[in-house]
Image (cartoon, grey):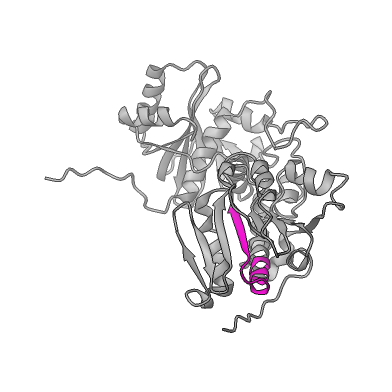
């Protein structure tokens, strides 16, 4: 059958990455720069040219195949699904894409590197290899290198990701003195290179969300390797973003919770007006917080209209305990550092976030929270300075992420007893 598709590659990093025959090509660029699209096209071209070859595509977690790889594959080559290619084993350990020319793409999660063994492939593509949601993907990379041994084919391992600090990707593709010798070829691109394929005002929103000129903007939009430095929330201004609690009608009221043992436990309310403006205030900020004090603070908050408590995902037992106490609780959407920071920076840059002037611990944290300094090669991933507390910041981030994801009119589900 004919499988010719007209594709126009972006000039620069995407084009170079797709056409490269280096053994270790890497497309590292800003968010929305066309990295996943470049990876899919590269793997497709190799599949067409090499019948019978096998490859493995990884995502940080298994759920991302339905969010990233497969939608992108269908957007370019969906007309051939069912005739030339077919998804098989969805949701299982043998998830794959089979082709009528004998090729197979194995779909495996990098979060379980111990399972990336026992098979032979011609190629591997690590999508979002810089993500650290479930830890570093370096071990997955090392295991995949050992899988490149299917006979009769040109072998390669590609990476498509946004940089994330001076981690293993930086060591392998930039800092290593033998990078060129070993075929570690880097193609660097920014979000601007893919502007024609992005929604209107996408780049403008990104510039606003990450604050143009900051290290996070340089990493997330320009696709540069940077070490976060200075203040975590550089656009926070006490004169602009702190005010008395308003006498307004709120349409949603939830709270974020950051559990502490010796460090402070924090409960931060996020109340939203009809215009979407978010107001934050402390309900609790206490070191060595006992259960009685914690439960009382939650009940007082519920009496004031708070309908849900969004908690640190690492506190599974505490979340279960809270629900047993009649305190409606869920785990936060993400504890990734970039997601937490963005949840604050975006509404602040939009002028849509205010902290109550009586929340002095929270104001102090957001004003002073700083990135850890890198000493030599000690710091490979971005972290907060241990000397600047982040308990209220994290509680606020948990609530802000949930508010962003909750549709207008959302209500806490009620249990209905069936008679």
Q: What's the magenta region?
A: 42-58
Q: Nearer the viewer, residue 228 or 110?
A: 110
Q: Nearer the viewer, residue 266 or 276?
A: 266
| Residue at horizontal 66 percent and vertical 57 percent from the top | 125
Is residue 250 visible in the rendered structure shown here?
A: no
Q: Is residue 51 magenta-colored?
A: yes
Q: Dividing the image into 4 quarters, which one contains the C terminus?
A: top left
Q: Is residue 218 left or right of residue 404?
A: right
Q: Dividing the image into 4 quarters, which one contains the N terminus?
A: bottom right
Outermost residue on the front side: it is 151
Residue 99 appears at what percent x and percent y?
54, 70
Instruction: Name which quarter of the figure residue 379 lies in.
Output: top right
Instruction: Name which quarter of the figure residue 370 lies in.
Output: top right
Is residue 222 visible in the rendered structure shown here?
A: yes
Residue 352 appears at what percent x and percent y?
56, 47
Residue 179 appears at what percent x and percent y?
84, 49
């Amino acid at each position: 059958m004919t499988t010719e598709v007209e594709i126009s590659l972006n000039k620069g990093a995407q084009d170079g990455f797709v056409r490269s025959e280096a053994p270790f090509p890497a497309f590292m660029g800003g968010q929305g720069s066309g990295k996943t699209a470049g990876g899919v096209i590269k793997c497709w071209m190799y599949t067409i040219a090499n019948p019978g070859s096998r490859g493995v595509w990884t995502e940080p977690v298994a759920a991302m195949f339905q969010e990233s790889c497969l939608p992108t594959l269908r957007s370019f080559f969906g007309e051939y699904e069912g005739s030339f290619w077919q998804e098989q084993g969805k949701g299982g350990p043998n998830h794959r894409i089979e082709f009528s020319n004998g090729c197979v793409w194995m779909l495996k999660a990098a979060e379980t590197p111990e399972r990336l063994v026992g098979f032979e492939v011609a190629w591997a593509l690590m999508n979002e290899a810089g993500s650290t949601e479930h830890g570093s993907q370096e071990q997955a990379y090392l295991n995949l290198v050992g899988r490149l041994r299917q006979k009769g084919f040109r072998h390669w391992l590609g990476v498509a990701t946004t940089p994330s600090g001076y981690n293993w990707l930086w060591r392998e593709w930039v800092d290593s003195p033998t990078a060129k010798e070993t075929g570690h070829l880097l193609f660097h691109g920014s979000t601007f290179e893919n502007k024609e394929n992005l929604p209107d005002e996408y780049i403008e929103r990104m510039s606003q969300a990450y604050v143009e000129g900051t290290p996070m903007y340089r990493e997330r939009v320009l696709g540069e390797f940077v070490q976060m430095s200075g203040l975590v929330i550089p656009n926070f201004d006490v004169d602009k973003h702190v005010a008395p609690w308003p006498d307004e009608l709120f349409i949603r009221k939830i709270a974020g919770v950051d559990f502490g043992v010796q460090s402070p436990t924090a409960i931060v309310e996020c109340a939203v007006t009809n215009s979407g403006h978010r107001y934050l205030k402390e309900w609790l900020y206490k070191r060595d917080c006992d259960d009685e004090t914690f439960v009382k603070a939650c009940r007082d908050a519920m009496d004031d209209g708070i309908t849900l408590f969004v908690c640190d995902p690492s506190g599974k037992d505490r979340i279960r305990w809270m629900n047993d106490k009649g305190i409606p609780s869920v785990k936060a959407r993400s504890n990734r550092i970039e997601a937490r920071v963005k949840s604050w920076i975006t509404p602040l840059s939009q002028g849509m976030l205010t902290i109550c002037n009586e929340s002095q611990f929270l104001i102090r944290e957001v004003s002073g929270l700083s990135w850890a300094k890198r000493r030599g090669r000690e710091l490979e991933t971005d972290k907060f300075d241990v000397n600047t507390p982040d308990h209220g910041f994290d509680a606020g981030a948990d609530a802000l992420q949930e508010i962003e994801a909750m549709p207008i009119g959302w209500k806490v589900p009620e249990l209905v007893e069936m008679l």
